[in-house]
Image (spheres, grey):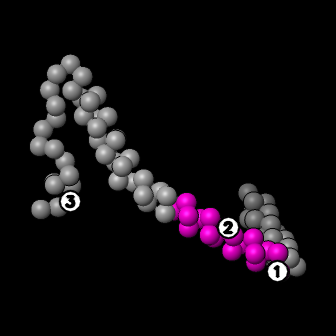
């Protein structure tokens, strides 16, 4: 049995707002499952940002030369049209 089969209810709720309630519950369940992964991704991005800022402070010349090089390449690619 797959995860999709165990996580999904067997039938949708019935009634006037049954479909809306089902969608709302599904969105809520998805939000609960993804909340921890989103927080983990935020923390990893924050750590990466700190490392990049540290590298830039320690190597400003290298960073500037890389930025110029990337800008040149993007400019050349954009001018090919």
**In front here: 70 or 43?**
43
Q: Tell me if 73 is positioned left or right of 9 in this view.
A: right
Q: Residue furthest right?
A: 61
**In front here: 64 or 36?**
36
What is the CA distance from the residue labelled 1 to the residue labelled 3? Answer: 47 Å
Please indicate, yes or no, whether residue 65 appears anywhere in the rendered image: no
Q: Tell me if 71 is positioned left or right of 51 in this view.
A: right
**Which residue shows up at 80% across the image and 63% down it?**
75
Q: Which residue in the protein does label 3 denote?
A: 3
Q: Which residues are magenta?
A: 41-59
Q: Tell me if 1 is positioned left or right of 33 in this view.
A: left
**In front here: 4 or 47?**
47
Q: Residues within 10 Å of mark 3 (few under 14, many from 20)?
A: few
Q: Which residue in the protein does label 2 denote?
A: 49
Q: Which residue in the protein does label 1 denote?
A: 58
Q: Secondary structure at mark 2?
A: helix
Q: Tell me if 17 is positioned left or right of 66 in this view.
A: left
What is the CA distance from the residue labelled 3 to the residue labelled 2? Answer: 35 Å
The spot of residue 24 in percent (x, y) is: 32, 34
| Quadrant in the picture for residue 17 | top left
């Amino acid at each position: 049995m797959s995860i999709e089969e165990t996580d999904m209810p067997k039938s949708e709720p019935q009634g006037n707002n049954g479909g809306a309630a089902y969608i709302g519950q599904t969105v809520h369940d998805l939000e609960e499952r993804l909340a921890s992964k989103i927080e983990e991704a935020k923390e990893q991005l924050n750590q990466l940002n700190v490392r990049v800022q540290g590298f830039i402070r320690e190597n400003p010349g290298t960073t500037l030369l890389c930025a110029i090089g990337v800008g040149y390449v993007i400019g050349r690619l954009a001018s090919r049209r």
